[in-house]
Image: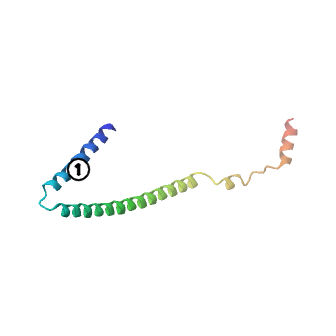
Amino acid sequence: MKRGIGTLLVGMTAFAGGILAGLVLSPKSGRENIKWVKDQSEDTRHWLETTGRKLKEDSEKRIDRFSEGIKKSMKDSLPDLYEATEDLDFSEDEEIEEITKHG
């Protein structure tokens, strides 16, 4: 786990360093670079929001399908309790007779 976090930090640092070097060595003016960075960050934010929304919707749909599948398999594999017990009679008279026979 620590190795993955370290690799991620190195990658992010290298990425930020590359952007910084590109801005410093760019033949464009500072104002043009700031506008470019702003435009790119807005595009990236929009892409992240759209992709995140799609991922969330897809995940919710998959969870719903999975949940329905579990419910269906449970229903198919377990008997309906009403059907399983509808022929049973739990009257008190039978209980008293059973007790007096054995008692």
Q: Residue at x 28, y 40 (%)?
A: 6
Q: How many dots with numbers?
A: 1
Horizontal side of residue 82 vs 97, given as left or right: left
Amino acid under label 1?
Ala
The residue where tag 1 is placed is: 16
Could you say which is closer to the camera, residue 32 or residue 6?
Answer: 32
Which quadrant would the C terminus be assigned to in this image? top right
Image quadrant where one finds the N terminus: top left
**Could you tell me residue 29's position as x and y percent?**
15, 62
- Report the residue at 29% width, 38% height from top: 3
Query: In this image, 81 relative to 16: left or right?
Result: right
Question: In which quarter of the view is residue 26 placed?
Answer: bottom left
Q: Position of residue 90 (x, y in %)?
A: 79, 49
Establish if 57 lies above or below 15.
Answer: below
Residue 60 or residue 101, whichever sits in front? 60
The image shows residue 53, relative to residue 17, as above or below, that is below
Image location (x, y in percent) of residue 85: 71, 52
Which residue, as the protein is rendered here, is positioned at the far top?
103
Where residue 33 sits: x, y (%)? Answer: 19, 61
Q: Residue at x 36, y 63 (%)?
A: 50
Q: Secondary structure at mark 1?
A: helix
